[in-house]
Amino acid sequence: MSLIEVIYKIKIEDFSETGDGALVNYITQSINHTYFKLSKRANILSSKEQHVSDLTESQQFYMENAPAPEEEHLSKFKLMLSGCNLTNAEKEVIIKFFFWETSVSQIAKEMKVSRQNVNQIKNRAIKKLRKIYG
């Protein structure tokens, strides 16, 4: 299902000038991120070693509807960034680079700017974060 979601979200017009290689790279990276997310969730569930049938109804409901750990981390990460007076571009670069481990060149393609510009944005954001968090 995740692969279908990735393909559905792709904006083909963004890749018309760059060629098929960029599109394949984007899909590969998306699959890797999804695999990472799902394997993290599977590791957490398997480490609990408690069968669903042993849980109460409310516990089962929570397990089925609880956000994935990376979603919680992303929410906390975004909350931390919200009080830092970062521009939207700075937040986007920081989240993609440090949280999703997206390459600078891929971020540049997605934002339609140069790699140098992405690095400048990233460095400017890091300076702001260092001032606040030391």
Image (tube, rainbow, N blue to C red):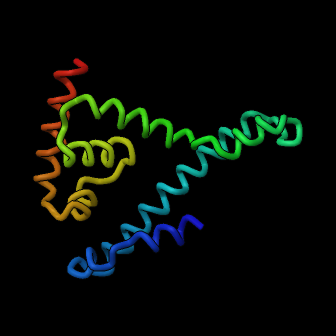
Q: Quadrant of the C terminus?
A: top left
Residue found at the very far top of the displayed protein: 134
> Which of the 4 quarters of the picture holds residue 84?
top left
Q: Where is residue 6 shown, x and y percent of the image?
A: 47, 67
Instruction: Judge from the rendering whether residue 107 lies leftward or rightward of residue 40; answer left or right.
Output: left
Depth check: 59 or 90 in front? 59
At 55% from the left and 56% from the top, the residue drawn is 35
Residue found at the very far right of the displayed protein: 53
Depth check: 89 or 127 in front? 89
Q: Quadrant of the N terminus?
A: bottom right
Residue found at the very far front of the displayed protein: 58
Instruction: Judge from the rendering whether residue 55 lies leftward or rightward of residue 117; answer left or right.
Output: right
Depth check: 50 or 80 in front? 80
Q: Where is residue 26 shown, x and y percent of the image?
A: 37, 67
Q: Where is residue 80 shown, x and y percent of the image?
A: 33, 30
Q: How many marks?
A: 0
At 21% from the left and 28% from the top, the residue drawn is 129
Instruction: Judge from the rendering whether residue 101 lies leftward or rightward of residue 71; answer left or right.
Output: left
Query: Can you say whether 102 is above or below 4 in the image?
Result: above
At 50% from the left and 43% from the top, the residue drawn is 71
> Which of the 4 quarters of the picture holds residue 51?
top right
